[in-house]
Image (tube, rainbow, N blue to C red):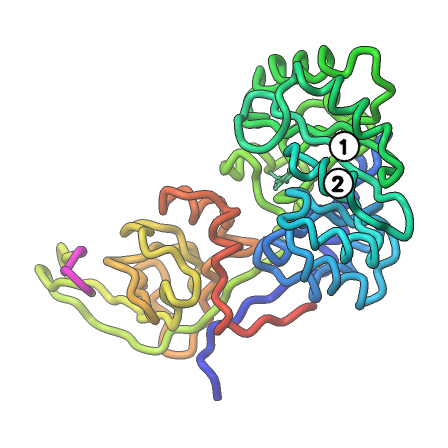
Amino acid sequence: MSRPVVATLDSAALRHNLQVARKAAPHSRVWSVVKANAYGHGIARCWQALSDTDGFALLNLEEAVLLREQGWKKPILLLEGFFHADDLAIIDRYRLTTSIHSNWQIQALARAELSAPVDIYLKMNSGMNRLGFRPEQINAVWRKLRSLATVGEMTLMAHFAEAEKADGITAPLRLVEQAAEGLEAPRSLANSAATLWHPETHYNWVRPGIILYGASPSGQWCDIASSGLQPVMTLQSEIIGVQQLAAGDGVGYGYRYRASGEQRIGIVACGYADGYPRHAPTGTPVLVDGVLTQTIGAISMDMMMVDLTPCPQAGIGTSVELWGNQVKIDDVAQAAGTVGYELMCALAPRVPVNVI
Ligand SMILES: *Cc1c(COP(=O)(O)O)cnc(C)c1O
């Protein structure tokens, strides 16, 4: 038998979360963002549950080709565009939509020999200073692209740096509106946070990612607690050992935890090599036999220790939820100084995944 650690993906939750996103932006079409192998969940495992979407957005040509080979016929958007001019042949062959963020890409498009015009997303830098053309360049770049025979439908795209904040979209949205003046430009601006919290950003296409997987774009579960979003991934394992501590006993590497009195602890078959965050401190929430308790000491590569004081009935073989419906991935992430996004993406390949 393999180790008891296992991840379970809830297809019904994925389907439901897509509907939550749709209801939040009822007049927009939806790009379901499945980059990073569907935020660690696995594109091949997830895409069918999301097939009510209008399109999938991702980064890798390999992921796009996989979706086409699995039978997805509707749009696919390459969020970072193409990385080499040669990629245009694959974009053409698989009918992909590509973002355009740099001049060299425009030159490559101008020179390309394609079987049909390719749809593009012109990416504007609205303040984040990651990818994209500056607002004052947009008008000229838009017109240049519009003049190319190799370019089909065009959409203006931007991305928010702090859409989880109440006033986080005001300045970038103004820049987009100024840049788009005089252009008949459909727009796609909204990530998950803007989809949920800033309807004025919705326009033609929204691009939710993290909310499809049931975690919070702000990193705080409380911000989405009333949204109806449901966690998709449950990471579970079992207790494989029990220790009885006396006052002063140390636990794990570096004895980062010491018992202040008698204490019973469980050893769980899950560690940082499974994707659990090594920085999770003593006190990180964990569910043992349905009872909320906490981690104790440093997380090891393959194991971690948990306090069994609130669940004296627990012993070897007792089930443990590391995150899922009861223990929110956002809460584990917050304890470890990170965000749910990172924990999902870090689920290790050695963890078996069940889809229900
Ligand atoms: C990742 C990404 C998204 C989705 O972001 P979430 O915060 O997960 O909703 C949307 N647009 C772009 C350009 C992205 O890179």
Quarter of the image for residue 270 reads: bottom left
Magenta stretch holds residue 254: yes
Left or right: where 163 falls relative to 275: right
- Secondary structure found at label 1: helix
- Residue that label 1 marks: 24
Rendered view: 267 above or below 111: below
Q: Residue at x 77, y 58 (%)?
A: 49
- Quarter holding the C terminus is bottom right
Left or right: where 92 falls relative to 350: right
Camera-side residue of 203 and 240: 203
Q: Residues within 10 Å of mark 1 (few under 14, many from 20)?
A: some
Residue 72 location (% of width, % of height): 84, 59
Left or right: where 313 falls relative to 109: left
Q: Main secondary structure of the magenta part?
A: helix
Number of numbered tags placed on the structure image: 2
Check mark 1 vs ligand 1: CB closer than 8 Å? yes or no: no
Q: Residue at x 90, y 53 (%)?
A: 115
- Residue that label 2 marks: 20
Camera-side residue of 219 and 80: 80
Residue 184 location (% of width, % of height): 87, 20
Residue flagged by tag 2: what amino acid is it?
Val
Magenta span of residues: 253-257
Check mark 2 vs ligand 1: CB closer than 8 Å? yes or no: no
Residue 116 location (% of width, % of height): 91, 48
Camera-side residue of 285 and 173: 173
Mark 1 touches mark 2? (CB < 8 Å): yes
Rendered view: 41 above or below 122: below
